[in-house]
Image (spheres, grey):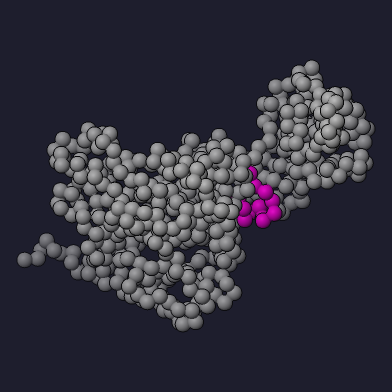
Amino acid sequence: MAAPSSNTCGLTERSIRERVPPLLTDLYQVTMAYAYWRTGRHQEPAVFELFFRNNPFGGGFTLFAGMQDCLLFLRSFHFTDEDVEFLRSVLPPATDPAFFQFLRGLDCSGVTLRAIPEGTVVFARVPLMEVAGPLAVVQLLETSLLCLVNYASLVCSNAARFRLAAGPKRKLLELGLRRAQGPDGGLTASRYTHIGGFDFTSNVQAGFQYGVPVAGTMAHSYVTSFTSLEEVLPKTLVAVNGDSTPVDIILLTKGWLSRVCELLGSQPGKIHEGELAAFLSYAIAYPRNFLPVIDSFSVGCSGLLNFCAVALALCELDYKPLGVRLDSGDLCRQSLEVRRVFRLCSKHFCVSAFDSLTIVGTNNITEQSMAELNEKENEIDVVGVGTHLVTCTQQPSLGCVYKLVEVRASPRMKISEDPEKSTVPGRKAVYRLIDAEGHAFLDLVCLVAEAPPEAGVSVSCYPLSCDTSCVSVIPAQVICLRQDMFTKGQVTQPLCSATETRAKVQSSLHTLHPRHKRLQEPDSYTVALSEKLHTLVTEIREGSSNNSNFLLAN
């Protein structure tokens, strides 16, 4: 697909300016910026990194998402007069008035961002993004960048897991807007679940703003709002074949209903008239998009029979019905019975359109229930997922962090009593090592000044999962993961559409060995430090310990 249209890009950038203004940050970012400015350190060159510490959902991988929004945020970053006046009202009265003038003139023209491309499979402890620039500015960016990456990457990864559970052939429909954490959460979910592998969304705004394909069926409320065939208006439909004579579709459908009941040995007295009226009314409105929910009363005794009658009437008028939705009970068992009836009608009435009718299943679908669909016999073509997808019920946060790694070209390291919270110092390059079968097997984190690893040449490194052990590996191929994304106030890489990024996700996942993609108990992927970077970490740790008694020094 081509790059997003200027209209789509414009909508996205305007949305970012509205959703993520500079004030969407934590107060301490502003007070630290003031302290830097007060001591004259605000222009010092500094480097921060964004990463996460553990893959979500107990899985073996994560998808990096939110990069495009970060770039648009940087491009539009500036404080308005109104922003500055508000900060003047909430910061302590002793704040130097000149600081507010400093804020008013800030932008990201001095910021450089290097990152792994959006849609790439990534792993814990690998620096996804490097943000370099004046200390005060890059400090102020922290909260907003984390906000843009955390949920986007989490829900995109969740969608990829649902896709893996569903398999490649089954279509997936995201319908979680009503269950999402607010409008922004709902819109973000619709965008990034599509990128993660879902085919459609029910969210109309996501279609408008991001070009995500939209789809929908029918709610039970529509069905239960009807009680009688007298409510069906109009009562006629013109055939597709060019005959402009209106056909009484109610009469036509009644005839088909009798024939269907006779074929299936069903009792007409159990058929719900209001349901039939709802189906007819909708079919008259959308004869080419007829896909009703059939479990408002009873699938076997009413819903399926009513659908077949209306669908056969549409076929007689040369329209093609789409299918049905099941939303309760044993979806697998019901889908088998529905498909059996469709095939029976196709054969008995010689209506080939019934051979390709779609069965949609929706009923509080979880990752586990999605996986179980592949273990049970069923005829479900499309699965709709809402709550457990967009709210990420297995894990509510990815836990990305944004840590300082260099100031004035000097490496910085956080040394914590919790080893997992220690950081890796210095500016870095990240390389993905590929084996002879084309699978990624190790991500190597090096100092940026180091020579890159070479294909076919042994590389010595220190896996982060080990304390001291050095290992040697020979890659068949080496990929540099980091790219320059933003320089001197300008985005330096083409902005991709959701569909293009979605394709990148599938391509990146394809390079991952199946053992790392297992939904349960996946093998851990190796992330390692180069020898030089490992040595730097060791030296800083030892130096920190040796310098801990500075108060006692002369």
Query: Is 164 one of the magenta-colored residues?
Result: yes
| Left or right of 259 on screen, residue 121 | left
Depth check: 291 or 372 in front? Answer: 291
Residue at 14% from the left image edge and 51% from the top image edge: 39
* Horizontal relation, residue 351 to residue 204: left or right: right
Question: x and y percent of residue 329 in the render?
Answer: 72, 38
Question: Residue 252: image x %, image y %?
Answer: 88, 27
Quadrant including the N terminus: bottom right
Residue at the extreme top: 230
Q: Is residue 52 magenta?
A: no
Figure check: 257 above or below 529: above
Q: Judge from the rendering whether residue 249 lies leftward or rightward of residue 282; answer left or right.
A: right
Q: Residues in magenta? A: 157-173
Q: Residue at x 48, y 70 (%)?
A: 479
* Quadrant assignment, res 486: bottom left
Please tell me whether residue 237 is drawn above or below residue 211 in the rendered image: above
**Residue 342: x %, y % from top left:** 84, 42
Q: Quadrant of the C terminus?
A: bottom left
Q: Is residue 403 visible?
A: no
Q: Position of residue 351 (x, y in %)?
A: 88, 41
- 289 sits left or right of 317 in the view: left
